[in-house]
Amino acid sequence: DLTCHPSVRLLKHVVRCYLRLADHHRAREALKTCLPQSLQDNTFGPHLHNDPTVQKWLSQLLTIVGPTVADVGNGMTGQVDLPSTNGLLGGVVLDKP
């Protein structure tokens, strides 16, 4: 589990993949409902202090995705409890841009 034993190298690839997905409109909308909570709540912050690139990418991702559906429903702008999605987009099919 990445939250218990974080690998900065793996986390770098995961964040970059989500950031690339966020470039696509439909994927960005899907990420608003299924972006893993651990990426939103600074779970990995202590492990990223030596990697400003991943910090920047994660910040960009959270800015691009904006408030999640749960944020809006709860009137929150910060951390929310989302159901676990194991990092998957739950069957979202992307069209070619």
Image: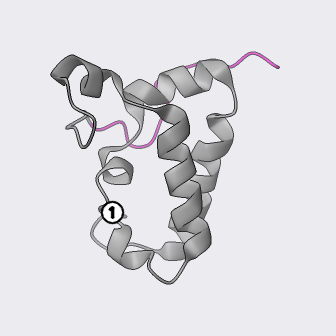
Please tell me which residue lies in front, 3 or 39. 39
Q: Quadrant of the N terminus?
A: bottom left
Residue 27 is left or right of residue 71, and the answer is right
Closer to the camera in the image, 94 or 91: 94
x and y percent of residue 79 in the render? 24, 43
- Describe residue 72's horizontal placement relative to residue 90 as left or right: left
Residue 88 image position (x, y, % from top left): 47, 36
- Relative vertical location of residue 11 with respect to residue 41 in this rendering, above or below: below
- Specify the quadrant of the image occupied by residue 48: bottom left
Residue at image point 46% right, 25% down: 90
Kindly tell me whether residue 67 is visible in this rendering: yes
User: Mark 1 — residue?
Assistant: 1
Q: Compared with residue 16, is residue 95 higher up or lower down, i.e. above or below?
A: above
Amino acid type at mark 1: Asp
Residue appearing at x 69%, y 33% in the figure: 23
- Residue 11 in the image, given as x and y percentages of width and height: 51, 64
Vertically, is 86 above or below 56? above
Residue 91 visible to the viewer: no
Q: Between residues 73 and 15, which one lies in front from this camera angle? A: 73
Q: What residue span does the magenta drawing correspond to?
A: 84-97
Q: Is residue 30 above or below residue 48?
A: above
Q: In which quadrant of the rendered image does the C terminus lie? A: top right
Residue at 27% over, 28% down:
71
Secondary structure mostly seen in the magenta stretch: loop
